[in-house]
Structures are given as C-alpha cells and as structure tokens.
Image (spheres, rainbow, N blue to C red):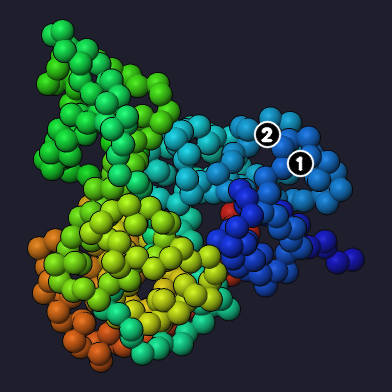
Amino acid sequence: MTSQPLRAAIFMPRANTFYLSLLFGLKRGFERHNVEVFASTSMYDEPCLLEFCNQFKPDLIFEMNRSRSQLPNLPRHIKHAAWIVDTLGHTVDYYHGSDMTYFFGGNWKRAFTADGGLVDWLPPGACEISYDFQPQQPVSDFSFVGHIPKPWTEEELSREICNYQNQTLKFGQLHDELLDYWKAISFENFENITYLTSAYELVEQRYGQKIDIEDQRLRYDLGCRMVRLRNRHQLMSLVLQSSDSMRIYGSENWTDWPQYRPHYHHFVDHSRELKQIYQSTKLNLHEGVGPHFRVFDAMSAGGLMFAKRTPDDSAEGGILEIFEPFVHYVPFSEEDFAELADKYLSDDAARQKIVANAADNVRAHHTWTHRAEKIIQDYYRVV
C-alpha cells in the first residue's frame, strides 16, 4: 500500500504578475518534491477556505501575510504556515497562532514574541526558469528596480502631533528633527515599530510629551514611509554623484521627484523584462534589510548585485548568512561607494567572476525548490 502524497495549498494576497511569478515558482518547487499543490492568487475568507478544505483536503496551507489567528475555525489537523513579507502596519506579534511562522526579515523574527509554532526566517528563492542565466552586453552602469513614496503634501506636513507650551508640534517639524535624530542611532535590529518608538522618544525628550499615535496612516508614515524615503534618497544621491548612466524602474512616483525623472523608465510587470534589466546592467542596486526578491532573481539571471551594507548584515536573516561579499555580490557604504563603483564598472573580468559565482550559488542553494524543501521538512517537524 502506497502512502498518499502530501497535499499543500498556497495562497498569495492578490493577482498580479509579481505574485503569479512567485506562486508558480513555489508551486513548481513543491511539485518537484512530489507534493500535490493547489495554488491561488486570492485569499479566501474563512467560510470559503473551510469549504475548500472540505473539497481539497489539504495537509498544509501556506499563506502570505495571514496567520492562523485570523482563521479561528480552521481544523487543527490542517497545518498552517504563515509567511510574513509585509506586516501591513501591524506589529509582528499580530501574526500569531500558526503552526509554522516565517518572516521575510530576520529582524521581524527576532522581534516576534507571540506563539507561532515553529518560527524561522524564510528568504525568497529564485525561479531558474523565469530567471535563467544569460548575461548580456551592458546598456547602463546602474539600475534600480523598486518603489519610492510620493513627496509629502502640505496637508501631510501640517498634521498635528501634539501640543506643548501653547504651541503645536506638526509632522513637518517632527520629520526634519527625526531625520537628524536618527543619525545618532544604531539601526541594528530595527523594524518599523522601533522607528515609530524612536519618534515617541524624541517627542518626550524634546517636548516633554508622551504620545501614542493611533492614526494608522501617520504610524505608517513615521515607521515606514519616512525610512524608505531616507534610504532611497541616500542611495540615489550616491549613484548620481558617480554616473549619469542610471535606469530606474518602478511606480510612477519616481517622476514626482525632479532629480530622478530623467532616469525613470517605467513600471515593470513581467519577469522576462526584469531578467533583461538585471542582465544588461553593470551594477544592479540593492538597499534594505536582508536579501530581497530582486537579489535572488538578479543573481540567478546573471546580474551583479551592488548592495548597500546594513547593521544587520551579519545577523540572522542578513545577507552575510547566505552570500559571501566580493564573491557573490559587492557590498558598499557611503564612504567607499565611489571607489568600488569605479573598480567594478571598469573591471569586466571581476564582474563576470562574481556573476558566475552568484548564479552557481543560487542554483545550488536558493531556488524555490530549496525553499519548498525546507517548508516540507518543517511540516513534518510539527505534524
């Protein structure tokens, strides 16, 4: 008598080309391990999910950005895995109750204190089909694929934070003071909520007011949007001081910033074009905590990653946990950006050696098939 294959259901938040590419990469990864897979780019509400379970009878449900606590009636014999890639304005402990809880960032895992069953860091993987290795002749020195928020409006800058000594502290003033305040802070293990907490600390220190902001938009702006804007501006300033040969892809928000408008191309919504961008750029830029989707995709396709160093690089979930600097990618800081950019823009042989090393490493250890293997192993640990 043969045993039944494991049945897994994968749910992504919504239908777009990014989630479809990710969904099919992970689906193929599971299928290579003889798992029967149902895959959807739609999150079912609980009644629909329960009916689905009655019909498909999955052993494992894997969902992005939803935990078992949001599905109180899901039968206990069905194991639930939550992969938190975006906290959506919540604290990480909001995502509790699953049998397996994975975090996109190692800092989120370290901040998690709730019950999440088996808790671990799960980085993205690469799809070797969508991002096959085919280096091309470069058409630009640099490229960046990613988002930038819009500039602040006058209405946003005039939002009230608190009152002190018959005066009103507004967001615009706090914004400028907070950017300066952050210069003296070590950002190791920082996550969105700790950026928000630093704003509370600043207000109490300078204005003697204890605040607790409830408005979700304002919380997001202080804990995420400000951080992303600061990081993007720092990165782009370094690049544009070094070269005009720069391509930017992402949302049209880039055109709202005059200094970036000449370098903006368009939003990319297909893996085929992303692959071509990575392959035809001398130095593909990355900034952020830990390896991003673009890091694995670019490495797999034959693009060299030029990644800004962070205080968390050597921590769990940091890039140094899985890649070796100057072997698989080139790390830089504000101090050595110009020197390293000059070297690797002009040294074709050095670039190609790193490109080949990175592609070999990704295919050996970091495809969606490898990620599926880990999830399956974890399932059998908790079943």
- Residue 232 horizontal side relative to residue 373, left or right: left
Q: From this viewpoint, is residue 23 visible?
A: yes
Q: What number of labels is visible?
A: 2
Looking at the rendered structure, the kind of residue marked 1 is Leu
- Residue 28 horizontal side relative to residue 82, left or right: right
Would you place residue 131 above or below residue 254 in this image?
A: below
Quarter-of-image position of residue 203: top left
Quadrant where the N terminus sits is bottom right
Residue 49's tag is: 1
Residue 118's tag is: none
Quarter-of-image position of residue 314: bottom left
Compute the Cα span from label 1 to label 2. 9 Å
Looking at the rendered structure, the kind of residue marked 2 is Leu
Residue located beneath label 2 in the image: 71
Q: Are marks 1 and 2 in contact (CB under 8 Å)?
A: yes
| Residue 62 image position (x, y, % from top left) | 64, 50
Q: From this viewpoint, is residue 362 visible?
A: no
- Residue 293 horizontal side relative to residue 56, left or right: left
Name the residue rendered at 86%, 66% in the picture: 2
Badge 1 marks a residue whose secondary structure is helix
- Residue 95 horizontal side relative to residue 61, left or right: left
Quarter-of-image position of residue 224: top left
Would you place residue 103 above or below residue 46 in this image?
A: below
